[in-house]
Image (cartoon, rainbow, N blue to C red):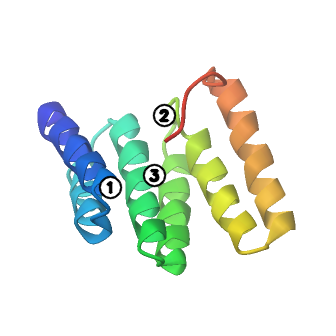
Amino acid sequence: MRSRSLAGIGLGIAYLSQGAAHQAAAAFRDVATINRATTYALFMVLAAVGEASAHRMAGALDRAQATYEQAIAWSVDHAHPSLLAGSLYTGLADLLRERNELDAALDRATEGLRLATELGAVGAERW
């Protein structure tokens, strides 16, 4: 399961780097699907951030926002969130900023930074 997830994440990133947004979204969605019932929260977060980035690249901002929101809901339901769970909130914040929903963006960014600090991921890079 882990090697398949890593391969899927790598494939999604490769598609993103080539500008193939729809293929990237599908690759990341596959990773999320195979990990939904596992305890591999890191793969779920990486897949969600990747899929949302692919939707955003394709100009599908509503789909990107829905992907972030679904992943946040999934993350909240799990007792041990991924070290990178704050990336879901900061990614959503950046999307909301782009849509000029500044109050909501500030709320999500604040929550993302709080989570990153709480989980010890302050120095973690977000792609």
Question: Which comes sooner in the sequence, label 1 or label 3?
Answer: 1
Q: Image quadrant of residue 110?
A: top right
Q: Which residue is mark 2?
A: 82
* Amino acid identity at mark 3: Val
Q: Label 3's element? A: helix
Residue ID at (87%, 65%): 103
Residue for point 27% across, 41% down: 38
Residue reaching furthest to the right: 103
Q: Is residue 36 visible?
A: no
Residue 49 coordinates in the image, percent (x, y): 45, 51
Query: Mark 3 sits on what residue?
Result: 49
- Distance from the alpha carbon under mark 1 to that under mark 2: 23 Å
Residues under labels 1 and 3: Cα distance?
A: 12 Å
Residue shown at 60% from the left, 53% from the top:
91
Residue 58 in picture, x, y percent from top left: 41, 74
Q: Height in image: 43 above or below 109?
A: above
| Residue found at x 66% / y 24% | 122
Q: Residues within 10 Å of mark 1 (few under 14, many from 20)?
A: many
Do the residues bearing badges 1 and 2 touch, measured as CB atoms within 8 Å? no
Across the whole image, how many numbered discs are drawn on residues?
3
Disc 1 residue type (three-letter): Leu
Question: Pointer 3 and pointer 2: residues touching (CB < 8 Å)?
Answer: no
Q: Is residue 39 left or right of residue 116?
A: left
Which corner quadrant of the image does residue 96 belong to? bottom right
**29 left or right of 100?**
left
Q: Quadrant of the rendered structure where residue 4 is? A: top left
Spatial CA distance of label 3 from label 2 is: 12 Å
Say which residue label 1 marks.
Answer: 16
